Amino acid sequence: MSESFINARTAGSIGFIELNRPESANALNRQMVKEIVNQAETFDADNAIRVIVIQGKGRAFAAGADIEEMKEETPLTFEMDDPFADWDRLTLIHKPLIASVHGFALGGGFELALHCDLIIAADNAEFGFPEVTLGVMPGAGGTQFLTRASGRRKALEWIWTGNRILAKTAYDYHIVNRLTAKELLDEETIRLAREIAERAPIAQRLIKEAVVHAEDVSLKDGMKLERKNFYLAFASEDQKEGMRAFSEKRKPFFKGV
Ligand code: CO8
């Protein structure tokens, strides 16, 4: 069996994917991206899992694409092997995806975090797109995701210079959801994941679809999908349970059905 570049584990209803190439600052080679996405899909299909967390082992979240591997690429190897198809699969995950980031999240590592729905960052996190210092540019959605978060001017400044974005700045520009002391990152990540995991999973799935859709369509079309999804939520037992629990003045217990 070939070497694996990730560790997967579960804790209650949380599925953890740990990037496990610490000697290379978790640089993402093609196989590693495939393993991350395969595991995310496995958790996505597992009824016992409600939230998926991606984190890095060692000093960094991920220092980008594996430059040693990438330097041999040609336009044709990209075209024929289509490695970005794996990244596209990540955008199809239905469950909440949280990136728990400490240390460097650079290049493809930053893009991996930006593919997640939420980012929780340790105060030592440093984000950035150094691709321009290598003569290239972001290729896994960096120009799109960062621009949507920070607006065009800051995105251009950061991607043109390759300058790092410190955790506090990333927070100020709505690139990350929450900031925490490095020592508390795991604890705060679990706290957030558990809070999400307690809510109604079908509603969350419908919410994710509607919110992601909002970035791409007209207000009218977005409202249309929201309304359909709102109707659909009323097909779930969780809707009955949630509203019954409110009337009975107790905490709801959602089963995701
Ligand atoms: N690729 C390959 N190896 C890496 C990478 C990388 N991206 N980053 C770090 N490493 C290796 C280093 O070569 C070093 O290995 P060795 O010990 O064998 O010399 C080891 O990890 C530790 O790194 P450093 O000794 O450099 O540690 P420092 O603390 O001094 O520096 C840094 C850490 C700042 C992260 C530094 O290593 C660095 O600048 N790395 C490169 C960052 C970078 O340029 N990232 C962008 C890569 S291009 C990209 O991501 C394009 C994305 C396109 C789509 C995504 C497809 C997957």
Image: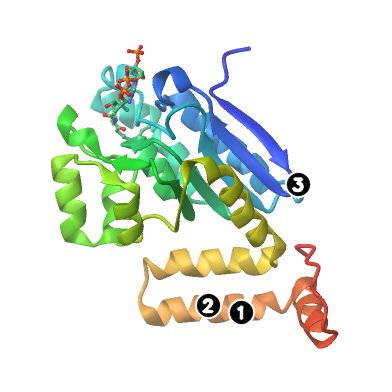
Please provide percent x and percent y for residue 226: 52, 77
Q: Write down the residue under mark 3.
A: 12
Q: In the rendered view, would you say 179 is above or below 243?
A: above
Task: From the viewer's side, name the closer residue of 226 and 163.
Answer: 163
> Do the residues under discs 3 and 1 have CB atoms within 8 angstroms?
no
Which SS class for mark 3?
loop
Which SS class for mark 1?
helix
Amino acid marked by disc 3: Gly
Please provide percent x and percent y for residue 8: 64, 32
Displayed quadrant of residue 235:
bottom right
Q: Residue at coordinates 66% horizontally, 76% vertically from top-left? A: 232
Which SS class for mark 2?
helix
Q: Residue at coordinates 71% horizontally, 62% vertically from top-left? A: 198
Of the image marks 2 and 3, the number of the one nearer the N terminus: 3
- The quarter of the rendered structure image containing the N terminus is top right
- Graded by Cα atoms within 10 Å as few (under 14), some (14 to 19) or many (20 or more), the crowding at tag 1 reads some
Q: Write down the residue under mark 2.
A: 226
Q: CA distance from mark 2 to mark 1?
A: 6 Å
> Do the residues under discs 2 and 1 have CB atoms within 8 angstroms?
yes
Q: Write down the residue under mark 1.
A: 230
Mark closer to the observer (2, 3): 3
Amino acid marked by disc 2: Glu
Task: State left or right for residue 228 relative to residue 27.
Answer: right
Q: In the rendered view, would you say 200 is above or below 75?
A: below
